[in-house]
């Protein structure tokens, strides 16, 4: 009798367990099992994306495709960093779903998935908003980016992102994160301006603000020589490190921000001028100044031209420099016409803008001859 009772109880238990499993499956968020590991934006029409808007509470940036390049609308259509744009779109196209669940109001607050312009949400509850739009302004995708999922002993390493798509009442956990997605227009600018090796500089001329009064000239005949100061003071020595600093100021030139330029004659913010003459005939004209309105920004204008030069053969320079010259001889030289065309294209790119540069880079454009000379005390010690 006891055996029959035990068998009956086991049967009843099995039926209850089966019923519970069925109820659990029926109550599971729809599609969760099907979606796991699948692309979130499998059919994202990448080629149709014509604009991108990134928004956070109190800050936003609008990017647009203009011709064959991307531009930053909030910076007068200055070119955007194409690599950053391509990386953003690629990451979204490759997103895979880890899991998904219902987006209740409490969940959205906890995971910072409230809209950035929601007046009733606190700062900690607000998401970053991302919109992909077509050239007609039609929405292609709208995403709210909430908190990142973090791992590690101190939960310091993001390895996933909670987000919502359009009007879907679901939260998705995806396999990539966007913790570094920037919402300031200046962060999307194409930062690199010039990479002119110091060895290519043949002459540097510093003039007054009017571009006529010469302050000093540094020059050399061949790339292997040091730049020498014309008519140096008899009682002062040239500071070689300062000269090298000035010669290399164009070697890695990048911007922090950009604004529209004004005509040079109307620009009260610019100082003296520098003209960098390269051995190939390219001339870079540089004007810099400290912004008197803020005292915290450093401004620069750039212009480029081509001046035909006659090739000179000269001696001098170290053995190492001669070896470098031999290596350079192997490279095919550009014709004057090609160099002139490149200079014209660069000038068209730089002409509409005034660039905000770091303080240390501003200080590298030395326009005071006294700063190119060693201090009198140092000269006395050497003597």
Image (cartoon, rainbow, N blue to C red):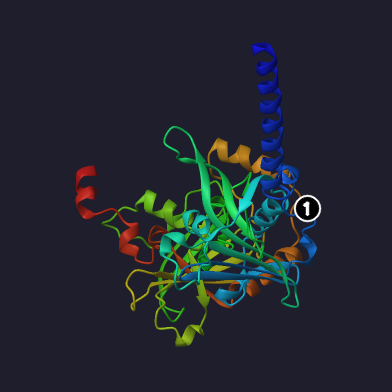
**In the image: residue 268, left or right of residue 82:** left
Residue 371 seen from this side:
yes
User: In which quadrant of the rendered image does the C terminus lie?
Assistant: top left
- Residue 162, compared with residue 12, is above or below; it is below
Residue 330 figure quarter: top right
- How many marks the image carries: the answer is 1
Please state the horizontal and vertical placement of residue 240, each as a whole percent of the image: 38, 49
Name the residue: 71% across, 33% down.
Answer: 18
**In the image: residue 227, left or right of residue 280:** left
Q: Nearer the viewer, residue 139 or 220?
A: 139
Q: Nearer the viewer, residue 24 or 343?
A: 24
Name the residue: 35% across, 60% down.
Answer: 232
Residue 6 figure quarter: top right
Determine which residue is flagged by label 1.
Answer: 42
- Circle 1 packing at 10 Å, graded few (<14), some (14-19), many (20+), is few
**Which residue is the extreme one toward the bottom?**
266
């Amino acid at each position: 009798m006891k055996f029959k009772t035990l068998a009956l109880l086991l049967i009843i238990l099995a039926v209850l367990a089966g019923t519970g499993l069925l109820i659990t499956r029926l109550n599971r968020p729809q599609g969760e099992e099907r979606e796991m590991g699948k692309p979130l934006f499998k059919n994202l029409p990448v080629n149709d994306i014509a604009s991108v808007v990134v928004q956070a509470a109190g800050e936003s940036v609008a990017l647009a495709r203009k011709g064959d390049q991307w531009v930053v609308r909030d910076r007068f259509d200055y070119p955007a960093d194409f690599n950053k744009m391509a990386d953003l779109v690629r990451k979204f196209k490759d997103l895979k779903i880890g899991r998904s669940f219902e987006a209740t109001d409490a969940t959205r607050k906890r995971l910072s998935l409230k809209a950035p312009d929601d007046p009733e949400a606190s700062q900690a509850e607000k998401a970053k908003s991302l919109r992909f739009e077509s050239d007609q302004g039609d929405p292609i995708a709208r995403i709210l980016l909430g908190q990142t999922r973090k791992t590690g002993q101190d939960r310091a390493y993001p390895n996933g992102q909670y987000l919502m798509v359009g009007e879907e009442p679901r939260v998705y956990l995806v396999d990539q994160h966007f913790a570094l997605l920037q919402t300031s227009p200046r962060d999307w600018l194409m930062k690199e301006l010039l990479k002119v090796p110091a060895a290519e500089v043949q002459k540097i001329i510093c003039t007054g603000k009017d571009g006529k009064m010469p302050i000093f000239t540094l020059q050399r005949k061949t790339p292997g020589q040091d730049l020498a100061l014309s008519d140096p003071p008899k009682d002062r020595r040239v500071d070689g490190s300062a000269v090298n600093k000035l010669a290399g100021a164009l070697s890695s030139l990048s911007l922090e921000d950009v604004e529209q330029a004004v005509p040079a004659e109307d620009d009260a913010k610019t100082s003296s001028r520098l003209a960098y003459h390269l051995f190939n005939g390219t001339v870079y004209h540089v004007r810099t100044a400290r912004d008197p309105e803020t005292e915290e920004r450093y401004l620069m204008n750039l212009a480029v031209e081509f001046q035909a030069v006659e090739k000179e053969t000269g001696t001098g320079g170290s053995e190492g420099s001669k070896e470098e010259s031999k290596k350079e001889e192997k490279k095919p030289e550009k014709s004057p016409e090609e160099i002139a065309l490149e200079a014209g294209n660069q000038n068209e790119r730089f002409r509409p803008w005034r660039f905000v540069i770091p303080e240390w880079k501003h200080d590298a454009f030395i326009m005071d001859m006294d700063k190119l000379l060693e201090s009198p005390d140092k000269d006395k010690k050497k003597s």
